[in-house]
Image (cartoon, rainbow, N blue to C red):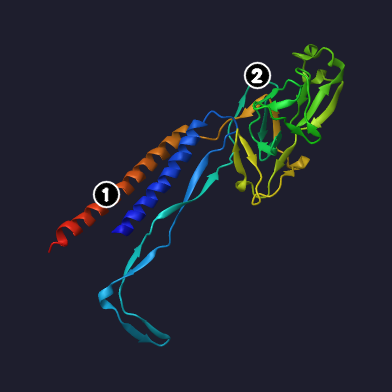
Amino acid sequence: MIRGWYTGASGMAAQQVRLDAIANNLANVDTDGYKRDVAISKAFAQQLLRRMNDDGLYLHPLGSGDMAPIIGKIGTGVETNELFTELEQGALKGTDSDFDLALDGKGFMCVETPNGERYTRNGSFVLGKEGYLETKEGYPVLGESGPIRIKENNFQVDKDGRVWVNEAYQNDPLDLVGREENEWEETVLLDTVKVVDFATVRYLAKQGSSLYRETEESGPAEILAAENRPKMIQGFVEASNVNPVTEMVRMIEVNRAYEANQKSIQAEDASLGKLINEVAKV
């Protein structure tokens, strides 16, 4: 009976981890570039049950065996194995900002932080005070040659991630407002937005603020060649891949499973109490 307590308690602990992951997903449903987490559980080893009053040995050509009949298997509980991040792409949504960038395909943009290079799918960028393209937390966005320095209304990013600036309007960039793409006749290539991928992307570690860091299991960041780069779209951001309806359904499932484990513990406790208080008296 005490074994049943531990089995039920392990189930409740695993469901609590699932609930925390779902709550975090729902809290970030409107966070650009957020990827939902899924709690993965694994069962402890099952035990084989035999009847004890039919013990003995029987002989066969290869040796001997136990005569106790097999009753079946019993589970011994469950534990959380890992918190898995689903990296499927979210929907692309248009914005009114030329500083916003979205990746249509696999890969990550790179930003420079005080702790080193980090990676993100959140392309909601701003123009920093010193003229660098930055995240909203103030981390510079990296090109293949370093941080990207631009002027407002004086740059374009094409589908290959190349950043073009117009030298003819450097003194008065407002002259470029409303111009068509074919009017950019005196553009020069400033840099290319650095886009990377990993050998085992599932082992990237979340760091907060929509940033990821590499781990020993994920392998180092590898700059994607031109033919493997995802399409980059200016004026768009990637939305979260969380479906709030699906998450709410999963939350209901977790609550039901938690209650079932709780009731099993209560039943075990009632049985043990009856054994001690009534059967023991006999």
Residue 55 versus residue 200 in the image, above or below:
below
Label 2 sits on residue: 96
Name the image quarter holding residue 34.
top right
The C terminus, quarter of image: bottom left
Secondary element at tag 2: loop
Residues packed near mark 1 inside 10 Å, few (<14), some (14 to 19) or many (20 plus): some
In the image, which disc is placed on residue 266?
1
Along the line of sight, the residue nearer the viewer: 158 or 174: 174
Q: Residue at x 67, y 20 (%)?
A: 97
| Left or right: where 133 falls relative to 27 | right
The N terminus, quarter of image: bottom left
Residues packed near mark 2 inside 10 Å, few (<14), some (14 to 19) or many (20 plus): few
Residue 258 versus residue 90 in the image, above or below:
below
Along the line of sight, the residue nearer the viewer: 230 or 34: 34
Residue 22 in view: yes
Disc number lying in front (1 or 2): 1
The amino acid type, in three-letter code, at marker 2 is Asp
Q: Position of residue 15 (x, y in %)?
A: 41, 45
The amino acid type, in three-letter code, at marker 1 is Gln
* Marks 1,2: beta carbons within 8 A: no
Disc 1 from disc 2: Cα separation: 57 Å
Q: Residue at x 54, y 46 (%)?
A: 84
Q: Position of residue 277 (x, y in %)?
A: 17, 57
